[in-house]
Amino acid sequence: MTWQRELIFHTLTSYTGYHFSAEDIYEIIHRQYPKIGLATVYRTMELFSTLNIVQKLDFGDGCQRYELYSPRHHHHLLCNSCGKVIEIKGSLANALDTIITTMTVTNFLVLDYQLYIHGYCKDCQTKRNHSGLSTVPSQNNVSRSNVI
């Protein structure tokens, strides 16, 4: 375990619940440790993904994101306007886990799954209502820079 990998792991554990890109992680670490390189962060995230330390996420914005691996599945709400990502936990996630587990019983081996629900967060709904814009979802390619 190199000091760079330890630093990256420490950063991930310090920001649990966040969905960082390799660039995000690099920016956080680089401020305090300018000798670390972006390529090192990319290689480390690939290694961590292979070792199931992190899980890769694709929110459809052209950027791989990562979160610490958890054996419990959770799902994500994605705001089409500001790009905010909110984790869904609790009964919905548990119900989906039960359905997926049942699929294994019916001779379908599930290796992995992810659920993304697109819409508008509370703040963006309020902004849209006050601006007179329709609340009907539109196709909008936004940056996911507002990831929680």
Image (spheres, rainbow, N blue to C red):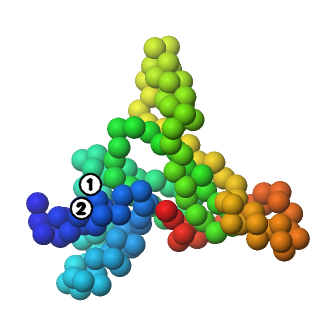
Where is the N terminus found, in terms of image quarters? bottom left
Cα distance between the residues tagged 1 and 2: 9 Å
Q: Residue at x 44, y 39 (%)?
A: 73
Q: Is residue 141 above or below residue 136?
A: below
Q: Is residue 31 above or below residue 82?
A: below
In the image: residue 138, left or right of residue 148:
right
Quarter of the rendering containing residue 119? bottom right
Residue position marked by numbered label 2 in the rendering: 9
Badge 1, how many Cα within 10 Å: few under 14, some, many 20+? Answer: many
Spot occupied by residue 96 in the image (x, y as percentages of width and height): 54, 31
Q: Residue at x 63, y 48 (%)?
A: 117
Spot occupied by residue 30 in the image (x, y as percentages of width and height): 28, 81
Q: Is residue 141 above or below residue 74?
A: below
Q: Secondary structure at mark 1?
A: helix
| Nearer mark to the viewer, of 1 and 2 | 2
- Total labels drawn: 2
Q: Amino acid at mark 1?
A: Phe
Q: Secondary structure at mark 2?
A: helix
Q: Tell me if label 1 and label 2 are in contact, CB under 8 Å.
A: yes
In the image: residue 39, left or right of residue 130:
left
Residue 43 visible to the viewer: no
Q: Earlier in the sequence, mark 1 or mark 2?
A: 2
Badge 2, how many Cα within 10 Å: few under 14, some, many 20+? Answer: some
Q: Amino acid at mark 2?
A: Phe
Residue position marked by numbered label 1 in the rendering: 48
Spot occupied by residue 100 in the image (x, y as percentages of width and height): 50, 26
Spot occupied by residue 33 in the image (x, y as percentages of width and height): 21, 82
